[in-house]
Amino acid sequence: MKKLLFLIVVILCSCQSNKKENSGAKPELNLPPDPYFAEIKVNDIKLRTPVFGDWLYSHPEKGQSFEQFMNTKYVVPTKEEDIIYLQPIGKFDALQVKQIELVRQYLEIFFQLKTKVLKEVSNDIIPKNVRRSGDLGQEQFLAGYILDSVLKKEKHEKGIALMAITEKDLYPKPEWNYVFGLASYRDKIAVSSIHRLYDKTLEGADFSLCLERLLKICSHEIGHMFGLHHCIEADCVMNGTNSLSETDEHSLRLCSLCQRKLNSGFKYDNVKRLKELEKYFKENNLAEGLGLMKKDIEKIKK
């Protein structure tokens, strides 16, 4: 079997989301950081030494310091561009529609930016020459076509990032079996598939498992669009990953360093965001995320 690509190990575009810059003001490096980041840093969990099969075993990345992040042309929301859009492509059942709405709610809290779901578009927009049958007989779409011929030309009011979600399986090029998705960080667009994110159905425990994976995938890839590189400092949603099992091992939480990077340009209320995340995880019975947020809340109360 060909090597598994995780969403979104970009084929032609490396994990660099900082090629374009919005005109938003950025903070000076010599300003003291919010004490919030030092308070929650104690809850960061150091990554274990990578073993064969892990992302860092085959990709020995150097990471990205706060200073390095600040010196890149990362994207900052402005009054003209401050809305994240989700574009469903295909025919979704009721549970899948619910998943997409829950992803929307989460991204709105995670990035503290308005997030909207666009009207569902038909699979008919994908021509026959970029469709094929997969290894199990399932229909697959060419992921690059969705980026280049569907998403790249889309312009939405005040849009800062655009992610398509399809129920069909994806492949990146003929010699690969499948891919969970693909992105162009330069163009701030991505496509992901939910086809392989649940074991059998979306009922019961599978619903929560699929939702958690979608939350990790979407926040990770949009985080790249906003200039965050793969994190090598702690267990973090920005960790690189080679497989779905490795994705499951990594945290939903942004580590304190990645939170500081994101907040530097967004300037949202850190405590407000944290409490909203806690409420979200509680309402959706996501125990891991809820436990992580409770630990951070305990630290900022002291």
Image (spheres, rainbow, N blue to C red):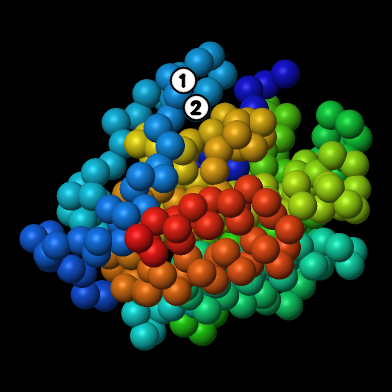
Q: Is residue 152 above or below residue 205?
A: below
Q: Which residue is at the far front?
A: 302
Amino acid bearing label 2: Trp
| Residue occupied by mark 2 | 55
Single out the mark in the foreground, 1 or 2.
1
Q: Secondary structure under badge 1?
A: loop
**Label 1 or label 2, whichever comes before in sequence order:** 1
The amino acid type, in three-letter code, at marker 1 is Pro
Percent position (x, y) of residue 53? 56, 19
At x 71%, y 67%, the residue is 283
- Judged from this view, the residue extending furthest toward the top is 52
The residue under label 1 is 50
Residue 191: x %, y % from top left: 62, 54
Residue that appears at 91% across and 35% down: 137
List x then y, in percent, for residue 301: 39, 64
Is residue 178 found left or right of 182 in the rendered image?
Answer: right
